[in-house]
Image (cartoon, grey):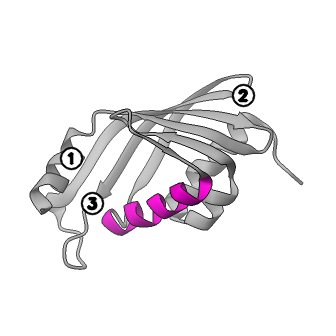
């Protein structure tokens, strides 16, 4: 059975993020999927986003989203909670590379797929880790 409830579709998307399954994520996206990160940068297309998830999960192998609350209106779903992860370093996940931050996400769900996913958070701790890596 195809799930069409926007909240359930958005929460399923979060579940696939937490499972680190880029192919399942891509299957939940519309072909013209639009992603907007917390800095306002956009990425378009389900396949490009699948590739981005592969790279992100390689950087942060323990990346996880926790949802505490959600609101919805029609096809728009707002999710509130937090995210955490650890920047991989030579095959290890050192404590000094761990971050946790509050975050919110906005999803636009069309029928049974996510058409847009936007992240709202202060990603300064993550950016500092990435800047120090180079």
Q: Nearer the viewer, residue 3 or 39?
A: 39
Location of the N terminus (image quadrant) = bottom right
Q: Give the residue number, with chain letter if any, for mark 2.
A: 75
Instruction: Identify the residue at image location x=27%, y=39%.
Output: 123
Which percent across, then down, holds residue 85?
Answer: 32, 56
Which percent across, then down, holds residue 116?
Answer: 59, 37
> In front: mark 3 or mark 1?
1
Q: Mark 3 falls on what kind of element?
A: strand
Q: Are marks 3 and 2 in contact (CB under 8 Å)?
A: no
- Vertical comparison of 22 with 91: above or below: above
- Vertical comparison of 110 with 57: above or below: above
Q: Nearer the viewer, residue 99 or 88?
A: 88
Q: Quadrant of residue 61?
A: bottom left
Q: Mark 2 falls on what kind of element?
A: loop
The residue stretch that appears in magenta: 46-59
Residue reaching furthest to the right: 1
User: How would you classify the magenta stretch by its main secondary structure?
Assistant: helix
Q: Is residue 127 left or right of 118 when viewed as pictured?
A: left
Q: Give the residue number, with chain letter if any, for mark 3.
A: 86
* CA distance for labels 2 and 1: 31 Å
Q: Is residue 94 left or right of 74 when viewed as pictured?
A: left
* CA distance for labels 3 and 2: 32 Å
Going from N to C along the chain, the mark reached first, 3 or 2, is 2
Which percent across, then down, holds residue 31?
Answer: 68, 50
């Amino acid at each position: 059975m195809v799930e069409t409830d926007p909240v359930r579709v958005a929460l399923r998307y979060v579940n696939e993020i937490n499972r680190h399954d880029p192919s399942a994520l891509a299957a939940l996206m519309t072909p013209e999927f639009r992603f907007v990160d917390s800095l306002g940068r956009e990425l378009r297309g389900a396949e490009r986003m699948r590739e981005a998830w592969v790279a992100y999960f390689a950087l942060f192998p323990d990346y996880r989203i926790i949802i505490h609350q959600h609101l919805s209106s029609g096809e728009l779903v707002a999710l509130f909670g937090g995210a955490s992860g650890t920047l991989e370093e030579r095959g290890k996940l050192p404590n000094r590379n761990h971050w946790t931050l509050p975050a919110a996400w906005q999803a636009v769900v069309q029928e049974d797929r996510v058409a847009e996913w936007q992240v709202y958070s202060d990603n300064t701790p993550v950016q500092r880790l990435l800047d120090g890596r180079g």
